[in-house]
Amino acid sequence: MSRGQKTARNLALCALLGALVYTMLGFPPYTVRGMLDRVERLYLLSDLEPVLVLVEKSSMRYDGDLLAHHTTYLIARTGDTYVSTDFTRHGLEVRPQYRRNLTMSRDALCTGVNGTLYVAGDFAGAASASVEVTAQRTTRTYDPETEEYELTLGEQKTFAYQGEKVSDALLSFDYREEDPDTWGVWGPNTGLEGAAYNWYSVYIKGDKSGGRSILHCDLPVKVTLYDEAGGTLDTLELTIDNYELHHSYW
């Protein structure tokens, strides 16, 4: 074989090997369009268009991993339906919903990513916006003897933030108030992130080890839209999972 033929043969073998690896990995989506196509197939949707695409700048590496994990967060819409999900890449492998389940909502959707709360919807007529998120101290205690849970509710606190209009379809609200290095420390100045972590707990009755799990809860979110003169245009009543709001989730 000539040198050119050998080169062509090696390129063909490389292409075949790449196709085999891609097949073995389950045809992972490496582009945003591919990720949205995967969401469409999984949830019987069509014509999804991205509203927001965020690629996590800080990588995460578990013990024993040579390669870091990089996460792409997506908010997309089709008609009046909005979805929020993520895809995490580790080497050649791409896993959907690695860090959160897909959220789907009509007319508007609320999600949190690394200290920023995003609200997607139709905001063409709005000039500005504010948001109020209400947290309530909530504890579930499991009794092994009766195999029942007891729910205890405590104080409430509402956190208010001014927003930025990113586009006619997206608002953002920065809620990270405390130093990320002390996010788990509870004090009088702790903001929404600390409350989302510290105020929602699950305990086992009689367990003296101090073990605690974080309870999943939906926090009420009130978004107020304003016109150019500062008058109120509309209010949206949404919810957000407390797991999306605290630092350990990222």
Image (tube, rainbow, N blue to C red):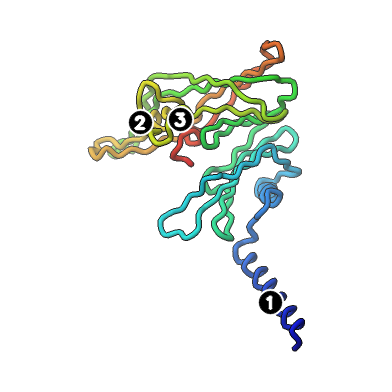
Q: Secondary structure at mark 1?
A: helix
Q: Which residue is nearer to you in this view: 220 or 144?
A: 220
Q: Position of residue 247 (x, y in %)?
A: 45, 37
Q: Position of residue 105 (x, y in %)?
A: 64, 33
- Which kind of residue does numbered mark 3 sit on? Glu
Q: Which mark identifies residue 13?
A: 1
Label 1 near label 2: C-beta < 8 Å? no
- Which kind of residue does numbered mark 1 sit on? Leu
Q: Residue at x 28, y 35 (%)?
A: 205
Q: Which residue is mark 3?
A: 193
Distance between mark 1 and mark 3 Cα atoms: 52 Å
Q: Residue at x 48, y 36 (%)?
A: 243
Q: Earlier in the sequence, mark 2 or mark 1?
A: 1
Distance between mark 2 and mark 3 Cα atoms: 11 Å
Q: Which residue is mark 2?
A: 185
Q: Earlier in the sequence, mark 2 or mark 3?
A: 2
Give the crowd class for mark 2: few <14, some 14-19, many >=20 residues within 10 Å. Answer: few
Q: Position of residue 45 (x, y in %)?
A: 71, 44
Label 3 near label 2: C-beta < 8 Å? no
> Which of the 4 image quadrants contains residue 182?
top left
